[in-house]
Image (spheres, helix red, strand yellow):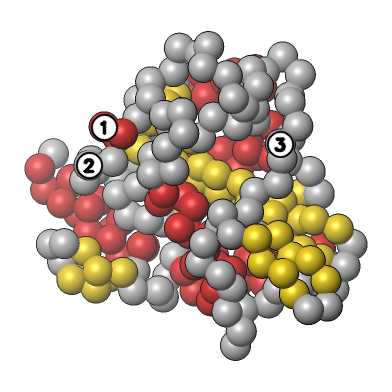
């Protein structure tokens, strides 16, 4: 199996063409703040990264996948405590609706807790009215990373590096085959089989980590 670069900010050139793995420029979303704007009232969240509670802090990001039909954009929501991908969506665009669809999937799985933090970078998809309305409807608290910091959303970005490295495919023939491989990676392998070292319980999958935290929460309650 081939390997992707684990640096999402590095431009990789193939001898047979140009490949870009960094996030492409994002278009402004109507009625949203531009991605470089500092004029928002959302918390800037380096303090959000230490919680041990599942469904307390969800982090989102967007990456893009090369196919013979053009780019396929993937948005995910990751539970910071378990590293489980709780929601995701794929489309041929990266408008705010892509992130909203992934959030609706996450909420529909029944893991949402009141006051959960929805953390992102400062892209225009995340400052859009459409996403803010959905976050308000679900009773979440919105947070954004600090200007110029690549660390505030590192958990979400590291998942994309892992996905591209472990799937190994650099270019799919079409969007449908890319969708199928990404679905299988998330649902069959990453959430249920891939082990990650937990500081208290040793090596567990994201699903097992969530189950441990749910059991612990039930005992306390």
Asked if 80 appears above or below 159 in the picture, the reply is above
Q: Are marks 1 and 2 in contact (CB under 8 Å)?
A: yes
Counting from the top left corner in percent of width and height, residue 135 is at 52, 24
Give the camera-side residue of 212 and 125: 125
- Residue 188 located left or right of residue 27: left
The label nearer to you, 1 versus 3, is 3
Residue, x 59% and y 73% (percent of image)?
A: 4
- Residue 132 located left or right of residue 179: left
As measured in the structure, the alpha-carbon distance from the residue carrying label 3 to the one carrying label 2 is 30 Å
How many neighbours does mark 3 have within 10 angstroms: few (below 14), some (14-19), or many (20 or more)?
A: few
- Mark 3 or mark 2: which comes first in sequence? 3
Report the residue marked by disc 2. 50
Q: Are marks 1 and 3 in contact (CB under 8 Å)?
A: no
- Mark 1 or mark 3: which comes first in sequence? 3
- Residue 4 located left or right of residue 176: left
Report the residue marked by disc 1. 47
Report the residue marked by disc 3. 26
Asked if 101 appears above or below 4 in the picture, the reply is above
As measured in the structure, the alpha-carbon distance from the residue carrying label 1 to the one carrying label 2 is 7 Å
Of helix, strand and loop, which one carries label 1? helix
Residue, x 56% and y 38% (percent of image)?
A: 103
Residue 52 seen anywhere in this rendered image of the structure: yes
Residue, x 70% and y 73% (percent of image)?
A: 170
Quadrant position of residue 117: top left
Counting from the top left corner in percent of width and height, residue 159 is at 48, 59
Extreme-left residue of the structure: 220
Of helix, strand and loop, which one carries label 3? loop
How many neighbours does mark 1 have within 10 angstroms: few (below 14), some (14-19), or many (20 or more)?
A: few
Extreme-bottom residue of the structure: 1
Of helix, strand and loop, which one carries label 2? loop
Give the camera-side residue of 88 and 96: 96
Residue, x 67% and y 18% (percent of image)?
A: 32
């Amino acid at each position: 199996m081939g390997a992707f670069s684990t640096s999402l900010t590095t431009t990789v050139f193939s001898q047979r063409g140009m490949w870009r793995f960094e996030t492409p420029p994002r278009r402004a979303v109507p009625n949203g703040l531009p991605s470089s704007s500092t004029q928002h009232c959302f918390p800037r969240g380096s303090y959000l990264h230490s919680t041990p509670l599942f469904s307390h802090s969800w982090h989102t990001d967007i990456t893009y996948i090369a196919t013979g039909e053009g780019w396929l954009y993937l948005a995910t929501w990751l539970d910071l405590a378990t590293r489980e991908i709780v929601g995701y969506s794929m489309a041929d665009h990266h408008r705010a609706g892509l992130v909203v669809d992934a959030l609706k999937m996450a909420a529909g799985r029944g893991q949402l807790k009141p006051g959960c933090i929805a953390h992102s970078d400062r892209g225009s998809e995340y400052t859009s009215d459409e996403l803010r309305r959905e976050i308000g409807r679900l009773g979440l608290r919105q947070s954004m990373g600090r200007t110029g910091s690549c660390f505030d959303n590192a958990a979400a970005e590291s998942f994309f590096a892992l996905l591209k490295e472990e799937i190994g495919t650099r270019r799919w023939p079409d969007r449908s085959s890319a969708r199928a491989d990404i679905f299988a990676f998330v649902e069959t392998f990453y959430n249920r089989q891939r082990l990650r070292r937990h500081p208290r319980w040793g090596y567990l999958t994201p699903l097992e980590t969530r189950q441990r935290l749910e059991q612990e929460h039930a005992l306390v309650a």
